[in-house]
Image (cartoon, rainbow, N blue to C red):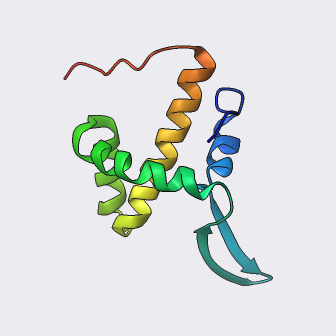
């Protein structure tokens, strides 16, 4: 669903998947940030892998735990992990490398 992966930078990959937060603000009023646009099917496909990554990938688990300790709701932390997965896939495709996990 994302044939452009491997040709984009980090921000563009996150936006294309619809996982980059967009601020709602006007003048002095500052609202909340939401994820909008992008490809919904990619977000749906990344949800379960993000849940698994938060349990079994040490780096992503650390990021998830850090976000939760900072007071972020679980869904916000999961969305950040989903974005991280897209950025990681984009980088691996761009460098034409395979995923090699770090030894514990």
Position of the N terminus, as image quadrant, is top right
Q: Nearer the viewer, residue 30 or 23?
A: 23
Q: Quadrant of the C terminus?
A: top left
- Seen at 64% across and 32% down, the residue is 5
Q: Is residue 54 left or right of residue 5?
A: left
Determine whether, in the image, residue 21 is placed left or right of residue 53: right
* Labels in figure, total: 0
> Where is residue 88 drawn, in percent x and y?
50, 32
Question: For residue 34, what is the image quadrant?
Answer: bottom right
Percent x, y of residue 83: 52, 47
> In front: 96, or 39?
39
Q: Residue at x 72, y 78 (%)?
A: 25
**Residue 40 location in percent, x, y?**
59, 58
Query: Which residue is found at the position 51% from the left and 14% from the top?
Result: 97
Height in image: 73 above or below 81? below
Compared with 11, 29 (above or below) is: below
Position above or below: 66 against 91 = below
Nearer the observer, 65 or 79:
79
Drawn side of residue 2 relative to residue 78, left or right: right
Q: Residue furthest bottom?
A: 29
> Residue 13: which quarter of the image?
top right
Image side of residue 49 versus residue 97, left or right: left
**Does 47 appear above or below 32?**
above
The residue sitting at 59% across, 31% down in the picture is 90
Q: In the displayed orientation, state which residue is furthest to the right.
A: 27
Where does the image place residue 85, in percent across and percent down from the top left? 47, 40
């Amino acid at each position: 669903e994302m044939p452009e992966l491997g040709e984009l930078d980090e921000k563009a990959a996150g936006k294309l998947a619809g996982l980059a937060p967009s601020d709602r603000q006007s003048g002095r009023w500052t609202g909340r940030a939401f994820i909008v646009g992008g490809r919904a099917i990619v977000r749906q496909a990344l949800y379960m892998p993000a849940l698994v990554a938060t349990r079994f990938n040490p780096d992503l688990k650390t990021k998830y735990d850090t976000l939760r300790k900072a007071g972020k709701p679980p869904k916000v932390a999961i969305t950040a992990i989903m974005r991280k997965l897209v950025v990681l896939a984009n980088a691996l495709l761009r460098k034409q490398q395979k995923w090699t996990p770090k030894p514990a």
